[in-house]
Image (tube, grey):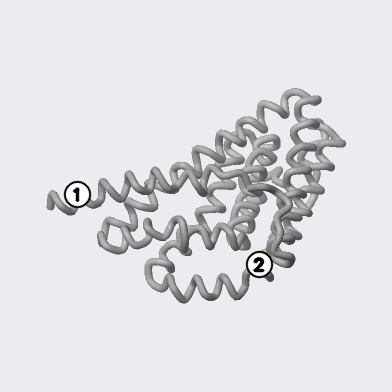
Amino acid sequence: MAGEEGGLARLAVRTVIITPSGALSPGPLSLSAIVAGAYLGWIGGVFVALGHMAFELPFVLLLLKASSSIERHIKKLYRPLTTAISLFIIYFSLLSFDAALKGPEAGGNAIPLEPASYSSAFIIGVVLTGFNAHFLLWWVSVGFPLITGAARNPPLGPAIMYASHVWMDFVWLALLAGMGDVASQFAPAYKALMALVGLMLLLFALDLMARAWLGRRVLPL
C-alpha cells in the first residue's frame, strides 16, 4: 500500500513538472482564451478549458488503451488536420482584427463562432484541441511518460495523472481570459490587444502550414 501511494505521488509530481511544457506554451488555444475573456471575463477561459478537456480526456483514455496505433493515425492525418486547424485559426484571426477595428463597444455581434457566448468559447476549445496535430502528438511524445505511468498504477493512476494535469489548463486559460477582460475595459488597450492576438494567430496559422507542407518554420517556437 505504501509503495502504491508512493508511486501515485511520484506520478502526480512528474505530471506537474511535465505539463507546463504543453499547457503553458504559447499557441492558438491560449490566444483564444484572451479573446474569450474580452467578451466573457475570466469565465470565458474556463469554458475554453472545458472544451479543451471535452476532447482531451477521451483522447487520453484512448491512449491508455492503444497508444501506438493512435500515434500512427495522427501522423498519417498530420497534413489534413493541420490544414483544417490553420483555416480555422485564420478565421479566428480575422475575428480578432475585426474586434480591434470596432472596439469593445461592438462586442457580442452575431458572428459565427465569435467567443461572445459560453457555447462558442466551449466549441472553440474543442476545435483548437481536436484538430491540433501538435497537441495530439505532445501526448504521444513529451506527455507519453505520464500515460505509461498512469497505466502502471490502476485504477487510481489515470485519475491522479489527469487531475494533476488538467487543473493547470483551467488556471492558465482563466488567467489569460482575465487579461482579456481587463484590456476590454480600456478601448485603446483592447484594440491593441485584439490586433496583436490577430497577428499572432495569423502567424501561428502560417507557421503550421509551412511546417506541414514545406518542412519549414515561420516562427522560432
Question: Marks 2 and 1: in contact by CB < 8 Å?
Answer: no
Disc 2 marks a residue whose amino acid type is Leu
Asked whether the viewer can see residue 110, the reply is no
- Is residue 209 depicted above or below 97 in this figure? below
Horizontal arrangement in the rendering, residue 74 relative to residue 68 (left or right): right
* Residue 138 coordinates in the image, percent (x, y): 51, 58
Asked whether the viewer can see residue 94, the reply is yes
Comparing 127 with 14, the one in front is: 14
Disc 2 residue crowd, few under 14, some 14–19, many 20+, Cα 10 Å: some
Comparing 107 with 148, the one in front is: 148
* Residue 118 coordinates in the image, percent (x, y): 63, 46
Q: Check disc 1 and report its element: helix, strand or loop.
A: helix
Q: What is the number of the mark on residue 81?
A: 2
* Residue 187 coordinates in the image, percent (x, y): 79, 25
- Name which of mark 1 and mark 2 comes first in the sequence: 1
Residue most extreme to the right: 101
Q: Check disc 2 and report its element: helix, strand or loop.
A: helix
In the figure, residue 16 lies in which quadrant? top left
| Residue in the image at 80% along x and 50% along y | 111
| Residue in the image at 81% along x and 31% along y | 105
> Which residue lies under the disc numbered 1?
5
Disc 1 marks a residue whose amino acid type is Glu
| Residue in the image at 52% along x and 75% along y | 72
Q: How far apart are the two marked residues, 1 and 2, measured between alpha carbons? A: 40 Å
| Residue in the image at 74% along x and 65% along y | 214
Q: What is the number of the mark on residue 89?
A: none
* Residue 115 coordinates in the image, percent (x, y): 70, 45
Disc 1 residue crowd, few under 14, some 14–19, many 20+, Cα 10 Å: few
Residue most extreme to the left: 1
